[in-house]
Image: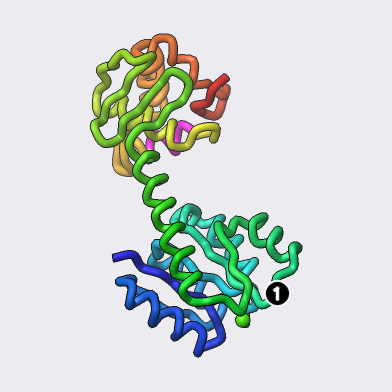
Amino acid sequence: MARILIIEDERDLAELIAFHLRQEGYDSTISGDGRSGLAAAIAAPPDLVVLDLMLPLLLGTEVCRELRRAPQTAAVPVLMLTARGEESDRVVGFEIGADDYLTKPFSVRELVLRIQALLRRSAATVTSATRVLHIGNLAIDSERHLVTVAGEAVALTGTEYKLLSTLAERRGRLQSRDTLLQDVWGYNYVGDTRTVDTHITRLRTKLGTAGDLIQTVRGFGYKLEER
Ligand code: CA
């Protein structure tokens, strides 16, 4: 059952939305101000957030920005509600990362339809994103733990696979040797950062033409990125 967090200070409206969402089979919770709404979303990320723009303690725009910034809520769809319908509000809503936008007064039926559309869209994205990640001629199938380069399967050890998928998930972002050691080998692993270098060298060789996707950043670590 999809969980929807409603951050709205107009109690009657929030209750009305929650009532209709329950009738559609959604589980919904209400936060009456921006600060507690943000805290609730971060503590237990919902499947979707209905976010009012004008909120006490923390404005909807700020809540939305923070939701996008936090890794656990960065991909949660946000539907913004606002009392005004000016173009500038709409633009602001999308600029700070809202996925959709409704102007008050709106019909709750319309809101429910938009929510259903957003949930369908995010389910589709998650499925395709978790199944196969493509970077250049490299493809990583996270469900089957299968790596191919230009369509040819590459046999990797468990550690090599974890190292590659960690770099791929964080593509374009520099990863220090210490970070990789912790995240791939685990916090309690006893070894030094040369372990990372050794594995990267072997991984590059095995990846062949995709090997140079893994770039060395001298004195710091590695990143995976298309050149
Ligand atoms: Ca309000």
Query: Closer to the camera, 96 or 117?
Result: 117
Location of residue 68 by image quarter: bottom right
Q: Which residues are magenta?
A: 176-181
Q: Is residue 179 magenta?
A: yes
Identify which residue is drawn at 57% across, 22% down.
218
Identify which residue is drawn at 45% across, 79% down.
17
211 over 24 or under it: above or below: above
Q: Residues within 10 Å of mark 1 (few under 14, many from 20)?
A: some
Query: Closer to the camera, 50 or 21?
Result: 21
The location of residue 84, given as percent across then percent down, is 70, 74
Location of residue 141 by image quarter: top left
| Residue pointed to by mark 1 | 84
Identify which residue is drawn at 40% across, 15% down.
204
The location of residue 82, given as percent across then percent down, is 64, 73
Q: Is residue 49 magenta?
A: no
The location of residue 7, given as percent across then percent down, is 51, 76
Principal secondary structure, stretch drawn in magenta? helix
Kindly identify the amino acid type of the residue bearing the numbered disc 1.
Answer: Arg
Decide if residue 227 is in sight here: yes
The location of residue 144, given as percent across then percent down, is 24, 32
Decide if residue 222 is in sight here: no
Q: Which quadrant of the rendered structure holds the C terminus?
A: top right
* Residue that protrudes farthest toward the bottom in the picture: 12
Identify which residue is drawn at 43% across, 18% down.
137
